[in-house]
Image: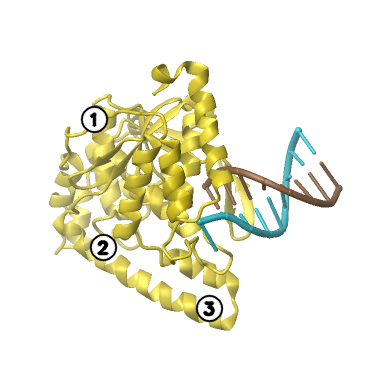
Chain colours: A yellow, B brown, C cyan
Amino acid sequence: MGVAIRDILADCKETLTWDELSGTAAVDAHNALYQFLSIIRQPDGTPLMNDAGEITSHLSGILFRTVNFLEMGIKPVFVFDGKPPEFKQETIEERRLARTKADEAWKAALREGDMEEAYRQASASSRIDSHVITSSHELLDLLGIPWVQAPSEGEAQAAYMVQEGKVTYSVSQDYDSLLFGSPVLVRNLTVSGRRKIRGRTITVNPERIVLSALQKCLGVTREQLIEIGILVGTDFNPGIRGIGGKTALKIVRSGAFDSVIAEKQPEFDPDPIREFFLSPPVTDDYTLEWRAPDVEGVVEMLCGRYDFSEDRVRSALAKVSVKAAQKTLDAWF
DNA sequence: CGGTCGGA
DNA sequence: TCCGACCGG
């Protein structure tokens, strides 16, 4: 659920500055890791790696972004995906095939010396494997940042945590947490505010989407918002060809969702997906505790095993200590 | 992505 | 001081 939904949300979001965002934030770990893995690469598409050939792009991303969050008064908790629902299998398989194809296209582009194409394909070949997950867990632990293992979708767990008032908002580039009922979603939470698009760099501001305001703005209920998602496509279904955000909104408002599905995709049963968005598996089995970073532990991990520069790591962590000292360590963490 | 450095 | 180019691992 991406582009299609974006144009109907255009007038239903607020642009803001970083100081309006202090609080606690449930970060969609899968989304963040994917961004790091796909973007933090050399111009030919090669990701950052240690001497042993293990990928480190995500570790760089987690370190510097976390430091920035803490500096801005944002205390993050990373929420990791658990077991996907059965009806996601088709999507998962499609994505696996797309990654394999991209991996081949990357090698081909390298042979032809087309670096821009190589970078694009390399990005699309990004895979969040078990090494990425376990090394992310380890780094977060050393940074004193809590993380939560969701029973199923991380977006759903993040939404639940905002609903319960355990965190202030959820953070993701995807809109799914809104369908899962997250009262507040923040997108574009990157410090640089710069995004490279087709060689051009443009500035993007953080944006906040408040679910209640969004529903009012579009004139739909949460159930209808889910129906819009299903029409344009979600992680769990491809959507209906030819139906974009605007059309989906009209269909849903006129109560024609069921008849349109029956007409266009008679073999498709949207009810399991609808039900999943409304009441996904979530857990209360977590504790949120922010601690001061274990500086020597982070240095041992990142510099000792992943070949990071000690100067860069220590100076990044020093910023957190300064921030903590301004408050008094205990009050802050 | 985010840090750094050098040139305007 | 601000921006673009380049580097990190």
Closer to us: A14 or A34? A34
**Residue type, numbered disc 1:** Thr
The tag on residue A287 is 1
User: Residue A299, image x and y in percent?
Assistant: 46, 44
User: Residue A114, image x and y in percent?
Assistant: 59, 76
State which tag comes first along the sequence, 1 or 3. Answer: 3
User: Residue A66, image x and y in percent?
Assistant: 45, 38
Judge depth for marks 2 and 3 and give the one in front. Answer: 3
Query: In terms of secondary structure, where does tag 2 sit?
Result: helix
Side of A11 where A213 appears, left or right: left
Q: Residue at x 35, y 70 (%)?
A: A98
Residue occupied by mark 3? A109
State which tag comes first along the sequence, 2 or 3. Answer: 2
In space, the residues marked 1 and 2 are separated at their CA atoms by 32 Å
Query: In terms of secondary structure, where does tag 3 sit?
Result: helix
- Label 1 Cα crowd, 10 Å radius (few <14 / some 14-19 / many 20+): few
Closer to us: A25 or A229? A25
The tag on residue A329 is none
Q: Is residue A81 depicted above or below A268 in this figure?
A: above
